[in-house]
Image: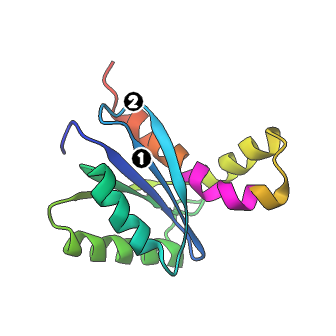
Amino acid sequence: MTSSGRVLALDIGSVRVGAAVSDFNRIIAQGLGVWNFETWREEFDASLKKYDPAIIVIGLPVRTDGTHGDACINVKAIMKKLSAEYPEREFELYDERFTTRIAQDVLISADISRRSRKKHVDKLAAVIILESWLESRRQY
């Protein structure tokens, strides 16, 4: 695993894809946006060019009981395809259990309307995935 360079995180759902990116030193996670699932690859490709991430972390939607359902199978298939298309990039799956729930709770506590929450929850979930991934790799 490369120890420096940006990290791009994706929260891939069936309707939307949330995206976040770290700074070069892997300290700060910043939300990039929420992309429509039908056209997210265009945004993904643009983000690869703009941020040149060393690693792409993809949230794995493991069920709360730890089992892998259809959503996990779909995400793994997407990662396999991306890995083949971008062999120079490093890809990693990361357990994203509860990230959407945490993101919802944060937005609710910030008194964000239900309509606005829908627009931002996937981006915030990607930030939470990335922050969690970064924290798990920090050496103190």
Quadrant location of the N terminus in the rendered image? top left
Residue 10 location in percent, x, y? 45, 59
Q: What stretch is highlighted in magenta?
A: 117-126
Q: Is residue 138 left or right of residue 122?
A: left
Q: How many labels does the image show?
A: 2
Q: Which of 8 and 51 is in front in this view?
A: 51
Is the residue marked by circle 1 packed among few (<14), some (14-19), or many (20+) residues within 10 Å?
A: many
Indicate which disc, 1 or 2, sits on the residue closer to the N terminus: 1
Q: Which residue in the rendered view is the most extreme toward the left?
A: 88
User: Which residue occupies 60% across, 49% down?
Assistant: 124
Residue 51 location in percent, x, y? 32, 50
Q: Is mark 1 on a helix, strand or loop?
A: strand
Q: Quadrant of residue 91?
A: bottom left
Q: Which of 104 and 37 is in front in this view?
A: 37
Look at the picture and state if 130 lies above or below 68: above
User: Which residue occupies 55% across, 70% down?
Assistant: 13
- The numbered disc on residue 51 is none
The answer to whether any part of residue 69 appears in the image is no
Q: In this view, does 97 lie to the left or right of 120?
A: left
Look at the picture and state if 136 lies above or below 7: above
| Residue named by callout 2 | 27
Q: What element carries label 2?
A: loop
Q: Is residue 134 left or right of residue 13?
A: left
| Residue named by callout 1 | 21
Q: Does the magenta stretch include residue 125?
A: yes
